[in-house]
Amino acid sequence: GEPELAARLLGLNHWEHISIPSTFPARNRPVYYWPVARMRHRMDDREKIKQAIALIHLANKFRGVRGVVHCNSYALGTFLDRGVATYDQEAHQRLVLHTASEREATFKRFEDGAYGQDAILVTPAATTGVDWDFVGWQMIPKVPYPDLSDDIVRLRYDYQTEEGDAIGKRVYQQEAAKTLVQAAGRCVRTPTSKGVTVVTDAAWWTLYKHVAPRAFPDWFRAAVQWYEPKE
């Protein structure tokens, strides 16, 4: 995240930021930006369905390869599942979803290959804590902002200093950036492993380039490029 903000939150008056480059080649871990639809609260389903169409495109592009869709919420995962089922039954047969109580069992079966070598796990719960070198591609259809319907998240978001600095909003943006960076790393766990991540939320570019550019490490930025789908 942003070094100055981290130091401020920790109450540090004297500190030094040391940036350590990644030992993983950027060519092995590309992060593609494909602005399919700008995701937002209470958006029109006719716009949101574009994410399901994008998922079908990626599923067909990566045939025979296991993938992960970091959907950020169970509701979005269900929406994507229904959308894919509407337009492409073959792709839909590859999707694997789970409830909160089924998470551990589903992850174990996914890791063991029980769902097939081309399974696509749609989950809001795998941005950290998993080492999945066997995953060849990932999709991030929505920037993983914390849930503002949670009372604590909302209170933190609304917090301002006496001087009027909206530090709560900045922390909120940093959390989203950190989670996205973590998600991108789930499929590239060693210097020799390879995995592709595609961010399809058109809202991401503003966060990445203008709102919180320093929240994304240089080694991450070195892997970012635009995605141009080829039919």
Image (cartoon, helix red, strand yellow):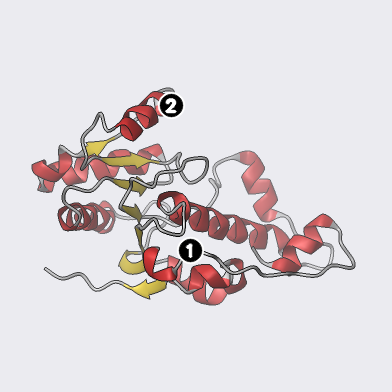
**Proximity of marks 2 and 1: CB atoms separated by less than 8 Å:** no
Q: Disc 2 or 1, which lies upstream in sequence?
A: 1
Viewer-proximal residue among 132 and 206: 132
> What residue is shown with label 1?
24
Q: Position of residue 186 (x, y in %)?
A: 44, 49
Q: Name the residue rendered at 64%, 60% in the picture.
A: 169
Vertical comparison of 205 with 125: above or below: below
Mark drawn on residue 206: none
| Amino acid beneath label 2 | Glu
Viewer-proximal residue among 159 and 201: 201
Q: Farthest residue in the front direction?
A: 192
Vertical comparison of 110 with 60: above or below: above
Q: Is residue 90 visible?
A: yes
Image quadrant occupied by the C terminus: bottom left
> What residue is shown with label 2?
104
Q: Is residue 207 visible?
A: no
Q: Name the residue rendered at 24%, 73% in the picture.
A: 228
Q: Position of residue 222 (x, y in %)?
A: 47, 74
Q: Name the residue rendered at 35%, 57% in the picture.
A: 195
Residue 117 placement: quadrant: top left
Q: Residues within 10 Å of mark 2 (few under 14, many from 20)?
A: few
Viewer-proximal residue among 22 and 160: 22
Q: Position of residue 176 (x, y in %)?
A: 54, 56
Q: Is residue 206 left or right of residue 38?
A: right
Q: Position of residue 148 (x, y in %)?
A: 56, 47
Q: Name the residue rendered at 79%, 63% in the picture.
A: 7
| Amino acid beneath label 1 | Phe
Q: How many marks?
A: 2
Viewer-proximal residue among 56 and 26: 26
Disc number lying in front (2 or 1): 1
Distance Cα–Cα, label 2 vs label 1: 28 Å
